[in-house]
Amino acid sequence: MNNKKIPEGTISRLFIYLRVISEFANMNIRTISSSELGERLSLSDAQGRNDLGYFGNFGVTGTGYDTFDLKKTLEKILGKDKTWNVAVLGVGHLGAALLAYAGFKNLGLEIVAAFDTNPKIIGQTIEDTKVYSIDDLTKIVSSKNISIGIITVSSGAAQGAADLLVRAGVECIMNFAPVSLNVPDEVKVKNMDLSRELETLSYFLVNKK
Amino acid sequence: MNNKKIPEGTISRLFIYLRVISEFANMNIRTISSSELGERLSLSDAQGRNDLGYFGNFGVTGTGYDTFDLKKTLEKILGKDKTWNVAVLGVGHLGAALLAYAGFKNLGLEIVAAFDTNPKIIGQTIEDTKVYSIDDLTKIVSSKNISIGIITVSSGAAQGAADLLVRAGVECIMNFAPVSLNVPDEVKVKNMDLSRELETLSYFLVNKK
DNA sequence: TGGTGTGAATGCCTTCACAGCG
DNA sequence: CGCTGTGAAGGCATTCACACCA
């Protein structure tokens, strides 16, 4: 255990460690070693030991980690015992896909509201989620205790959407619009620029030929 | 100019530099300085100079960069003069959203085929893209000269989809399934694990309270 | 023997600082 | 004077290597 700043990559990996460890625990395999974990995820064994080491000494020398214990511990560290409410801004193709994305259901993250400006969509219920007018955002963010906003509106509308979210008190934003958002430092933004990721992949092809 | 290995982050940023520079060029603003560029993207001025420096000396001391020239140069470096063909595997909500995603249209990346196993979908045309049986993948990848595959199938089917793509000769894979894929070193994989990204955001909330 | 925990070493990327030049 | 290009410095994250322990 130590007090050093925890790398963002470490946090991110802890979530996939938890997935693997849960699998093992569900199969009633009681022990996992750092090398088994690493192999499973194409990571070095040292990486896993190091990452876990930021939070404590969970392993048993010569044996490995107890999957039952480590599962519980990680769930606690990562806040899996809590639920966070999420809003989706923009119910286009991508927004609708996210509403339907089964993957979110078991994460302790619940999409509790969607917002749009299109009167034809407002009032509908898509995949169990009601679509509200963007004008009601502030009210609903506070009444439904929403702390994460996902922006899937157009580039032009993204900054406005972000401003609304921030003013409403949302603390995290996941942004699918390909623009850099201007928000206060206290708000955490994660950019998910799909176009750029694809472009970056294509550069790999350019340099192969 | 130097021969050092170019960081992945640099490549990725070049694409957004190009966006900004194109905007300037389109507005007939002929010059941009590294500080203007950086401010626009919340990056330091040194970052931009450094990134560009990997590829040559494009700037004019005391003035800045010529937007017209730099636009052309970056387009060439990044392979924007070429087109790459893309296939989408799995036409669920997310797959369909990607087919519709207007953002890809202008990137020099074209989605030329989609694949699924569901007989109800096979043969349909969604957003101008025809959906084929996964059995025809090898044939169509080669006939349509596809070099990038996007996997939006379920976790269980993802490795199989990746194997098919690799055997068919695809060189880049963008993977939306939350599993780590096993592919040869020559194939470039980009994982887009939306669940994990959202989870990572929520960790930020856990630590605020 | 096998596997953890950890300081030390390495490597990568970003930032600094400034010489040099139009 | 302003801004680029760049060597040097700094910081962060991953990997190495091994002491130590069941």
Image (cartoon, coloured by chain):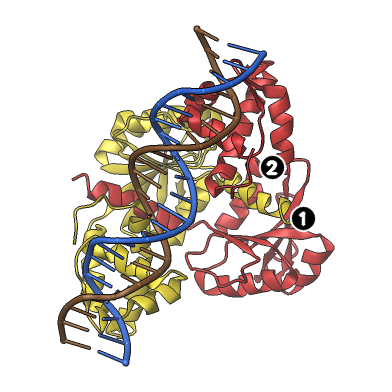
Chain colours: A yellow, B red, C blue, D brown
Quarter of the picture holding the C terminus of chain A: bottom right
Q: Residue furthest right?
A: B143
Using the image, determine if residue B120 lies above or below residue B67: below
Quote the CA–CA distance across marks 1 and 2. Answer: 13 Å
Neighbor class of circle 2 (other Cα within 10 Å; few <14, some 14-19, many 20+) is many
Residue B110 in the image, given as x and y percentages of width and height: 73, 49
Local packing at callout 1 (Cα closer than 10 Å; few below 14, some 14-19, many 20+) is few
The residue where tag 1 is placed is A209
| Residue located 50% across and 34% down the image | B47
Q: Is residue A139 visible?
A: yes
User: Which kind of residue does numbered mark 1 sit on?
Assistant: Lys
In the drawing, what numbered circle is on residue B3? none
Q: Amino acid at mark 2?
A: Leu
> Disc 2 marks which residue?
B78
Residue at 18% in and 62% down: A1
Q: Is residue A139 left or right of residue B8?
A: left
Q: Position of residue D2 (x, y in %)?
A: 52, 12
Give above or below for A31 relative to A53. Answer: below
